[in-house]
């Protein structure tokens, strides 16, 4: 282990203890770095490191871990099927943020830290259509033809008045509903 890494480990351990004992009633993690943590990290790291060691370590990290290539989002990725149903794939991503105050302060000061954000890619499968000449396609097109563009929404207006529950809610049948006009409902 090189001297810089060893001193950085010691600095992190000392800082963790200082934070733990300095504010016993504070939460363990916050999104905002307090001025006392900023000052403690800055003072400690100035004593344990120098600019040359930090620059060398950053260069080693950049060489070992190049910047990841960002893939375009909301892009069609391909078709998939489970028999008669055909799905269109779309690439999406989820971003996670690191809110650890120690890493935030080290990153602000320019020291090498783990990435503050990470991007996780996944493919979302969305139903697109049924295969032609399949029983599923026949049933689906028959349903659409018989329902003639109607919806499953029962109420066109459904709201509570300000004086509810003394006064009943206001509701109005949706005349484009599949249930409209049926007997026994």
Image (tube, rainbow, N blue to C red):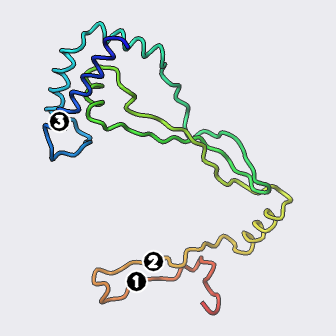
Helix, strand or loop for disc 3: loop
Q: Residue at x 60, y 39 (%)?
A: 75
Q: Is residue 135 left or right of residue 143?
A: right
Please name which of the two marks, 2 or 3, marks the residue nearer to the observer.
3
- Looking at this view, name the residue that lies furthest to the top: 52
In the picture of the structure, the residue carrying the numbered disc 3 is: 34
Helix, strand or loop for disc 2: strand
**Residue 148 percent location from the top left of the image:** 69, 72
Task: Estimate how packed mark 2 is, as few (under 14), some (14 to 19) or many (20 or more) residues with alpha carbons within 10 Å.
Answer: few
**Discs 2, 1 touching: Cβ within 8 Å:** yes
Helix, strand or loop for disc 1: strand
Residue placed most toward the observer, 174 or 42: 42
In the picture of the structure, the residue carrying the numbered disc 1 is: 170
- Looking at this view, name the residue that lies furthest to the bottom: 184
Q: Residue at x 20, y 25 (%)?
A: 41
Q: Is residue 147 left or right of residue 35?
A: right
Q: Residue at x 14, y 32 (%)?
A: 35
Query: Residue 157: which disc?
Result: 2
Instruction: Give the alpha-carbon distance from disc 2 to disc 1, as whole Å.
Output: 7 Å
Q: Residue at x 63, y 78 (%)?
A: 178
Instruction: Give the alpha-carbon distance from disc 1 to disc 3, as whole Å.
Output: 51 Å
**Residue 142 percent location from the top left of the image:** 78, 70
Displayed quadrant of residue 176: bottom right
**Residue 132 percent location from the top left of the image:** 83, 56
Instruction: Give the alpha-carbon distance from disc 2 to disc 3, as whole Å.
Output: 50 Å
Q: Is residue 45 left or right of residue 124?
A: left
In the depicted structure, whether residue 132 falls above or below residue 145:
above
**Residue 11 percent location from the top left of the image:** 24, 22
């Amino acid at each position: 282990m090189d001297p810089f890494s060893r001193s950085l480990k010691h600095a992190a351990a000392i800082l963790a203890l200082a934070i733990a004992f300095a504010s016993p009633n504070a939460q363990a993690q916050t999104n905002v770095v307090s001025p006392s943590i900023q000052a403690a990290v800055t003072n400690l790291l100035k004593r344990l490191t120098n600019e040359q060691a930090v620059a060398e370590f950053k260069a080693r990290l950049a060489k070992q871990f190049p910047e990841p290539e960002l893939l375009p989002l909301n892009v069609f990725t391909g078709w998939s099927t489970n028999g008669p149903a055909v799905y269109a794939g779309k690439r999406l991503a989820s971003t996670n943020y690191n809110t650890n105050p120690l890493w935030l302060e080290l990153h602000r000061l320019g020291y090498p830290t783990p990435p503050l954000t990470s991007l996780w890619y996944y493919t979302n499968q969305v139903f697109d259509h049924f295969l032609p000449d399949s029983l599923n396609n026949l049933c689906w097109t028959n349903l659409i033809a018989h329902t003639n563009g109607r919806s499953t929404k029962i109420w066109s207006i459904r709201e509570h008045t300000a004086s509810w529950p003394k006064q009943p809610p206001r509701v109005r049948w949706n005349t484009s509903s599949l249930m409209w006009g049926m007997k026994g409902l």
